Amino acid sequence: MDFDTISAISTPMGEGAIAIVRLSGDEAVQIADRIFKSPSNKKLVEQPSHTIHYGHLVETKTGEVVEEVMVSLMRGPKTFTREDVVEINCHGGIVSVNRVLQLVLTNGARLAEPGEFTKRAFLNGRIDLSQAEAVMDLIRAKSDRAMNVALGQMEGKLSKLISSLRQALLETLAQVEVNIDYPEYDDVEEMTQSTIIEKGQWVKSEIERLLQTSSQGKILREGLSTVIIGRPNVGKSSLLNSLVHENKAIVTDIAGTTRDIIEEYVNVRGVPLRLVDTAGIRETEDIVERIGVERSRQVLKEADLILLLLNYSEELSPEDERLFEAIEGMDTIVVINKTDLPNKLNMERVRELSAGKKLVTTSLLKEEGVDSLEEAIAELFFEGSIESADLTYVSNARHIALLHQAKNSIEDAIEAAESGVPIDMVQIDVTRTWEILGEIIGDTVQESLINQLFSQFCLGK
Ligand code: GDP
Ligand code: ZN
């Protein structure tokens, strides 16, 4: 394929010791050569591939030195885009990195659209669509585990599985063809039906398995939004602190997004918790009192996980009861704190109120019980059965939607086969399932979809 040379800043904007301006395309090396001056006057175009060069960038007209740089030279096809790629490492900081970009653009490169590098990798056949989307997830990955999922997908885990499902469907379709070619044999018809049912069931169960991982996948990618509630003085700040201090905070800023909400991520046994720090949500002194049960239900509903704190050394108050009301039906862990003090809390009543919810006891003062709380959090979302990063997680909304469609369509096929509908009708459903699954890996997608997808990428990726 023939592409012009594109360029963009491919490190996050803002501070940072170094920044990278990346070029990709037929002219990448020539453009860099035009503005690069090494101490020994070597020409970049004469240098071997996959080498790094020290020098300065200069204005072509005036000879003015713009930046001190390290230039990496990588000729296609062994590059991310499969094209010639040049990466200019310069000092971080918005001003200098923008000057480098400007210089590159005035010397023949075009500003890349968001996601265009990844799009080229896709169009040049280096990666398939689900891998391209995984790159996007990778950029946003919020925990080590989410990173592994994204990496696994990038390596084609999901693609491989989807391909095997499509292969099974193709074999089924081949069987149908045999049947259509030899309609006079009754047992062929029967065989075809049982093949469709059998393979269809397998495909369906694999899709269901994938879908089951999807909610976990979303959590892994986006973090579990977590709200700590309880009466004043019960220990909310103490709990927050011990969660943050015992677990390494992961990411404090999402590059490229402007948000009012500051989010803090902590990794609890592989579950990224997003402690949402909006006024009155992360630490609500008296949310119910202040805004009423209905309204606080609304606020709390947006949380994935609620940690409700009670005081072991005080009697249950009407406010505690209201909090229980407000969190009805939500994933909640009831934390009974201050167990180092004499008991006044009616435990029987608490058990009644927390019917079906997990209950843990802590003394945050003595740093006791935080372990069991963490275990409860992990259990709640992985049902204690999460197995390292070996599962294939589906965490992408588009994939999930397509998997649902594929599931419906294979169910139609199974049902039709079971009720003896003419085989060429069943064939339509099987073919459709095959097509839908193909869309996940980009085999049957239209151009417009591709453009839409890649425009979601960060600039420079
Ligand atoms: P918040 O108002 O709910 O945020 O509660 P804080 O976390 O600020 O704690 C209120 C007070 O209770 C502080 O003086 C804490 O040191 C104390 N505290 C927190 N947890 C415990 C505990 O487990 N036992 C005891 N005895 N005191 C605690
Ligand atoms: Zn507090």
Image (cartoon, rainbow, N blue to C red):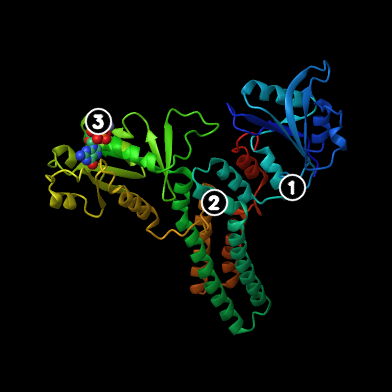
Residue in the image at 51% along x and 61% along y? 207
Quarter of the image for the C terminus: give it: top right
Callout 3: few (<14), some (14-19), or many (20+) C-alpha neighbours within 10 Å? Answer: few
* Left or right, residue 151 beside residue 20: left
Element type where label 3 sits in the image: helix
Identified by mark 3, the residue type is: Ile
Residue at the image point whose x is 49% and y is 73% from the top: 418
| Rendered view: 339 above or below 390 | above
Q: Residue 155: x and y, percent?
A: 62, 54
Q: CA distance from mark 2 to mark 3?
A: 41 Å
- Residue under label 1: 124
**Badge 2 density bin: few <14, some 14–19, many ≥20, Cα 10 Å:** some
- Looking at the picture, which amino acid does disc 2 mark? Asn
Mark 1 Cα-neighbour bin, 10 Å: few <14, some 14–19, many ≥20: some
Q: Which residue is mark 3?
A: 291
**The N terminus is located in which quarter?**
top right
Compare residues 147 and 287 and report the one nearer the observer. Answer: 147
Q: Position of residue 240 (x, y in %)?
A: 33, 38
The residue wearing badge 2 is 148
Q: Is residue 344 visible?
A: yes
Q: Assess whether mark 1 and mark 2 are in contact (beta carbons under 8 angstroms).
A: no
Q: Indicate whether 70 appears above or below 160.
A: above
Q: Which residue is pictured at 62% across the width and 50% down the height? A: 131
Q: Quadrant of residue 426?
A: bottom right
Q: Amino acid at mark 1?
A: Asn
Mark 1 or 3, nearer chain start = 1
Spatial CA distance of label 2 from label 1 is: 25 Å
Work out how far the residue at label 1 is from the one at label 3, CA to CA, in angstroms.
56 Å
Secondary structure type for disc 1: loop
Q: Residue furthest top?
A: 62
